């Protein structure tokens, strides 16, 4: 009994030191002691973030062979390569918490780790590539800019790197939309249709309302999250409305109104049933995205085996 | 496949221009040093961020333990005379 009590006291003391450090604004680095809850929260959030970057390559990859010009194709290829790179920055940062890359991939394949549900929607037209860059990356940027100040050092540094690259993504998407809105009536309708389909899922990317977000409190207390879901969502809406107006797109929300008192836009209710349906595996493309990831991972197994055999051979040679 | 592997981990350091310090950028997985260099290039220098890259096997890095910081860095704590601001300069002396 006494031993248990002693251990509990030691734990409490560790937690106190940790929280003092967080409150001072110090970053937490990989070798620092941290509560299990902090480590677990970060592993979940960072691996989910990494998986989202990688799964997000699929809806855009769908349009590489059908990009309307060589310029558009080169840009799209570079953007998708960036997304892969962002996934790697984040896996690398998550590995500093003691989880291996293999484990993270296994958790994704077994369905235990999630990725952003926005990527379970299909890219039906070229305008969807514009909408993803402008709205989906735009929403991601708002979140990632905030995360640059997250308390875990490697995560924060990965975010700084990612934010530098993301603004190209958002601008290329907005350029596609602007071009289409200057085009034929069909092209304008196509752009508006993409706007209509991507607007609400983009708002859902910020997650449930603060009142419904079960894990928020620890994450805010430990400065993993620096702003709440609703704050970030509001920031995204406020900056996007004007951009839509400039190019003549209508935001598909009849309740969207400028509120003089709050200095923000009010918006209509979000369809959380849809959000939960898609998160729980019943979006239009969940199965396709996972099947593709598993297939490519398995198809690449022989390459990894060959490189591993080569490594072992070289190791033997260097011993002789 | 039980023997599937993501390869050993390498830490990546990048020099942004000649004369600058090498700064830690992150890590990559690779089977050997060539592959590590190429992966580091593709992952961390897609926009001309570097003119030179070091890759080091993560397992070869020895790091100090933050729990020992007080003791470990103690020798430096009471030697203010190692800083130029410690010294009193005569009034009027210039360029020192």
Image: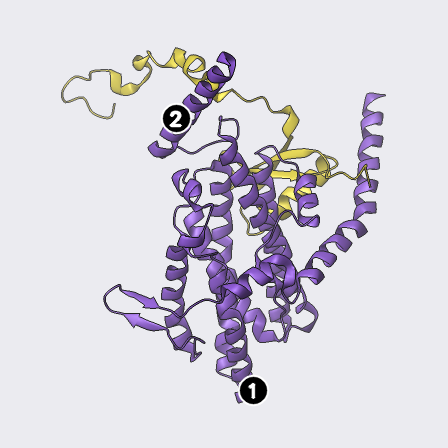
Q: Please identify the quadrant where the C terminus of chain B is shown.
A: top left
Q: Quadrant of residue B76?
A: top left
Question: Which chain is depicted purple?
Answer: A
Kindly identify which numbered label has been placed on residue A186.
1
Q: Please identify the quadrant where the N terminus of chain B is shown.
A: top right
| Residue A283 left/right relative to A229 | right
Q: Name the residue nearer the viewer: A55 or A5.
A: A5
Image location of residue A252, percent across then percent down: 45, 76
| Residue A252 left/right relative to A43 | left
A142 above or below A92?
A: below
Image location of residue B36, percent across then percent down: 68, 38
Q: Name the residue nearer the viewer: A315 or B87.
A: A315
Q: Secondary structure at mark 2?
A: helix
Task: Please tell me how crowded label 2 is: few (under 14), some (14-19), or many (20+) other residues with Cα within 10 Å.
Answer: few
Q: Which residue is mark 2?
A: A16
Image location of residue B88, percent across then percent down: 20, 16
| Rendered colour, chain B | yellow
Q: Quadrant of residue A245?
A: bottom left
Give me the residue at 76% from left, 38% from top: B5
Give me the residue at 68% from left, 39% from top: A103
Give me the residue at 37% from left, 73% from top: A256
């Amino acid at each position: 009994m006494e031993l248990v009590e002693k251990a509990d006291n030691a734990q409490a003391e560790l937690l106190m030191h940790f929280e003092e450090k967080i409150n001072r604004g110090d970053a937490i680095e990989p070798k620092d002691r941290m509560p299990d809850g902090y480590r677990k929260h970060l592993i979940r959030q960072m691996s989910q973030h990494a998986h989202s970057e990688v799964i997000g390559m699929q809806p855009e990859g769908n349009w590489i062979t059908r990009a309307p010009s060589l310029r558009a194709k080169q840009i799209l290829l570079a953007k998708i390569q960036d997304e892969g790179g962002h996934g790697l920055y984040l896996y690398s940062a998550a590995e500093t918490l003691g989880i291996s890359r293999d484990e993270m991939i296994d958790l994704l394949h077994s369905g235990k780790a999630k990725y952003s549900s926005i990527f379970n929607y299909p890219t039906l037209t070229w305008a969807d590539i514009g909408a993803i860059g402008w709205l989906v990356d735009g929403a991601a940027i708002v979140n990632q800019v905030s995360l640059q100040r997250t308390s875990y050092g490697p995560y924060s540094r990965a975010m700084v790197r990612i934010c530098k690259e993301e603004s190209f993504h958002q601008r290329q998407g907005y350029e596609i939309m602007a071009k289409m809105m200057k085009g034929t009536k069909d092209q304008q309708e196509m752009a508006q249709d993409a706007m209509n389909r991507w607007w609400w899922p983009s708002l859902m990317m910020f997650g449930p309302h603060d009142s419904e977000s079960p894990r928020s409190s620890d994450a805010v207390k430990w400065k993993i999250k620096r702003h709440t879901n609703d704050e970030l969502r509001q920031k995204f809406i406020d900056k996007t409305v004007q951009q839509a107006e400039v190019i003549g797109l209508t935001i598909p929300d009849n309740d969207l109104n400028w509120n003089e008192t709050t200095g923000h836009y009010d918006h209509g209710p979000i369809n959380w049933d849809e959000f939960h349906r898609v998160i729980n595996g019943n979006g239009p493309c969940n199965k396709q995205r996972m099947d593709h990831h598993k297939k490519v991972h398995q198809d690449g197994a022989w390459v990894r085996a060959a490189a591993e055999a080569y490594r072992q051979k070289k190791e033997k040679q260097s011993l002789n | 496949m039980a023997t599937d592997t993501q390869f050993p981990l390498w830490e990546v350091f990048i020099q942004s221009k000649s004369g600058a310090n090498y700064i830690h950028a992150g890590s990559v997985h690779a089977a050997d040093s060539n592959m590590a260099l190429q992966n580091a290039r593709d992952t961390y220098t897609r926009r001309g961020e570097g003119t030179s890259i070091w890759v080091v096997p993560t397992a070869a890095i020895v790091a100090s333990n933050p729990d020992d910081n007080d003791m470990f860095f103690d020798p430096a704590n009471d030697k203010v005379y190692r800083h130029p601001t410690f010294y009193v300069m005569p009034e009027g002396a210039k360029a020192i």
